[in-house]
Amino acid sequence: MDKDIDKWPIGVFTSIDAGLGVHLEVARDLGVSTAHLHAPRAASRTAECAREFSSRLEDFGIEVTCVFGGFEGESYVDIPTVKATVGLVPLATRDDRLRELFEIADFARLLEVEAVGLHVGFIPHGPDDATYRDIVVATRTVCDHCVQNNQALHLETGQEPADVLLRFLADVERDNLFINFDPANMILYGVGQPLPALEKLGRYVRSVHCKDATWSSEPGVTWGREMPLGEGDVEFAAFLQTLGRIGYRGPLIIEREIPQEPERQKAEIGRAIELLAKLKQQLASKNKK
Ligand code: MG
């Protein structure tokens, strides 16, 4: 029997001093008990900062389950710029970013967080591409660093179709490599319907972002539009049903990429929490029938 009460705690994406997540105080005011964290700037990745942050997390009763890497110089302004600037794909910054990612993983370990999240960048879609092979090797290196910290690496979905990602996971050949599934990214980047992708990737999905978006009129060429949860093209009732089918029990992390205005974040994310709580309840009572 499914103990629905225990699964899918609702949480939020948070930030300390980098990224567009909510600050910890906003997360506390929203009453959540679980969160993802955008890695802080390099200067803040110290043992002292980790201690201070851990103690605030404890005071607020919030558990961070994944720390996401992010780098200076990344830009999400349009799809070609993402290809040129994001993750481990750009050759000019790859080695520096690998080193930085190790640092981020070590900072996450200080927070006792067992997963590191990453937008690896646009993985070339053909396995014969030299860059593809280099990214496989680079990702292996990150997995091997994480394993020393008892951590998993969660690749954020978005820039590639599910089949490309499945082949990539197989080629990296590391058993601490998993997926953070973000249904809105599939829509924003125009790389496929999110729910069939979630079914396909199911056994690898270890964390999820609840984010919403509408399709672009030219999918894959121009951006779709990120929307408040429930107002875009991700069907969240069906999303939760699919999560149930693949056996996912972890947190539902609401991610909203809006400026850090606490009142706006509280209002919008508060509504998203209510909606997800309602959908969870509807699904639980449907499953009981
Ligand atoms: Mg995301």
Image (cartoon, helix red, strand yellow):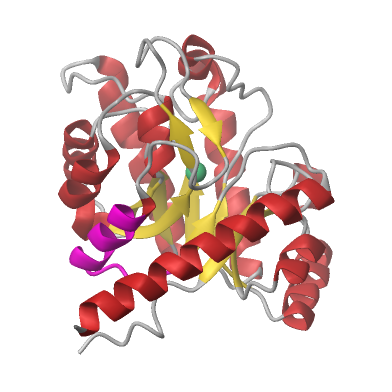
**How many numbered marks does the figure carry?**
0
Seen in the image, is 13 located left or right of residue 83? right
Magenta-span inclusion, residue 241: yes
Residue under the point 41% across and 45% down: 182
Q: Position of residue 81 (x, y in %)?
A: 53, 12
Q: Is residue 276 visible?
A: yes
Residue 148 against residue 154 in the figure, above or below: below
Q: Nearer the viewer, residue 243 or 238?
A: 238
Examine the residues drawn in magenta and state their main secondary structure. helix
Q: Nearer the viewer, residue 203 or 173?
A: 203
Magenta-span inclusion, residue 160: no
Residue 210 against residue 183 in the figure, above or below: below
Q: Position of residue 82 (x, y in %)?
A: 51, 19
Q: Nearer the viewer, residue 117 or 146?
A: 117
Seen in the image, is 27 located left or right of residue 11? right
Residue under the point 31% across and 87% down: 3
Q: Position of residue 1 (x, y in %)?
A: 20, 90
Q: Position of residue 170 (x, y in %)?
A: 17, 44
Q: Quadrant of the C terminus?
A: bottom left
Q: Quadrant of residue 270?
A: bottom right
Residue under the point 41% across and 54% down: 153
Which span is picked out in magenta? 237-251
Residue under the point 76% across and 37% down: 259
Q: Is residue 251 visible?
A: no
